[in-house]
Amino acid sequence: MNLPFAWEEAAWVDALQHIKVIAKAFNEGGVDLKGAAKVATVVRSAHDTDWTAAAAAYRQHKQRVSDRTWRQKYTPVFEAALKALGSKNAPTNGVDLCDAALKRWEPGTRQRQIMRQSLSGFLRFCVQRRSFKSCWLPPAAVDGEYVNEKRIGYPLTDAQVLRLVDAVPDTAAGHRWRFALQLLAVYGLRPEDLRHLVTRNNGTELWSTYQKSKGGRKGARTAERRLYPLLVHDVDGAVDWNLQQRVHLKEELPPLGQPGKAGEALGTFLKRQPTWQSIAAEAAAEGQELVPYSFRHRYSATGHARGLQPKQMADAMGHSLEVHMGNYARFMTRDLASAFEAVNGQACLTHSGDAGQAVAVGG
């Protein structure tokens, strides 16, 4: 009995799957080896092009992926792939399918990388679990494609925060946005936190009830957290904007769009502000990027500069210590030069004292 595959290494996956089906049919009885081979051919043919069923099976396979993540990180590229497969010049292998499905995302972007990972995982599933031909495997490596390096988020200084706040237009809408910017800077908020601010214990505590989804863990969310201020300082010392009291009194915040879109609303407002554009140029000159999260970066940088420990900062910012160390550890050694200067200065004083003592004893 001959198997319907070319005698080459690339066909081993198809051949193995075909042999497994033959073995199953033969072991279940009722057919001889030749009959089992015919059954395998029918099964293989039925599975080869059923992309819709394969996509549904893959969704069941990825049970830990939330519905929201599935819609954002899988559905777009799957729809693009199915559209390509239904076109006049449909791809006939995984490499060409990836190229066709990923056209809408610019090479080098993080979004394209995410879509490629999602489609590649699906294609491997189709070959390994759905008996698709091995020609549908995705490319093992992508020549000439790279992912842009993640730019470093710029931590706003207190002076820059004050410039931004002072430059907000003196209008009803401007007052609401000024309030939002002050809250973001002083409490290190995520933009989405602005929707979820409440006071407790008769207004003596400020809390965020926002529970952010934890990546990679279906259904897992961060806990509500109490907020602690790191006041902005000017030349005269701390500036107290009475933010907690203003939240308690229900002062109005700006419209933030649909849930999950607060960052976009904030970014749209900021990009229209000349002062924001000026500070963005200052950040770019240092090889960093000014982003809506720069208020949050300011909070972390300030907290570490004022002596707070990593676990304290992680708890205050509402994420794990692991996440904090991965994203904000750079602020722990931001003033490394001064620290070494202080140590070296102390060493010089000690050395001078020892030398003086030696001279006195010797005399």
Image (tube, rainbow, N blue to C red):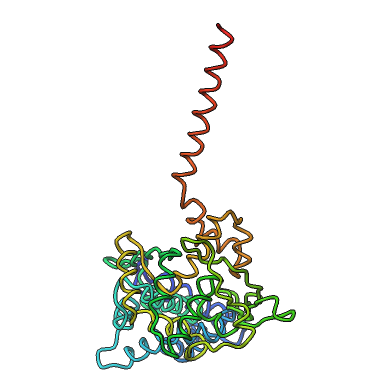
Locate residue 90: give its quadrant: bottom left
Q: Quick check: 284 above or below 356?
A: below
Tell how many labels: 0
Q: Quadrant of the N terminus?
A: bottom left
Q: Quick check: 330 above or below 92?
A: above
- Residue extending furthest toward the front: 236
Left or right: residue 277 compared with residue 240: left
The x, y position of residue 220, in whole percent, is 63, 77
The x, y position of residue 128, in whole percent, is 48, 75
The x, y position of residue 242, in whole percent, is 59, 76
- Residue extending furthest toward the right: 201
Q: Is residue 14 visible?
A: no
Q: Is residue 325 visible?
A: yes
Locate residue 337: give its quadrant: top left
Q: Nearer the viewer, residue 315 or 269?
A: 269
Q: Quick check: 25 above or below 13?
A: below
Q: Nearer the viewer, residue 154 or 75?
A: 154
Q: Residue at x 38, y 69 (%)?
A: 290
Q: Quick check: 252 above or below 310?
A: below
The x, y position of residue 58, in whole percent, is 51, 83
Left or right: residue 202 compared with residue 34: right
Q: Quadrant of the C terminus?
A: top right
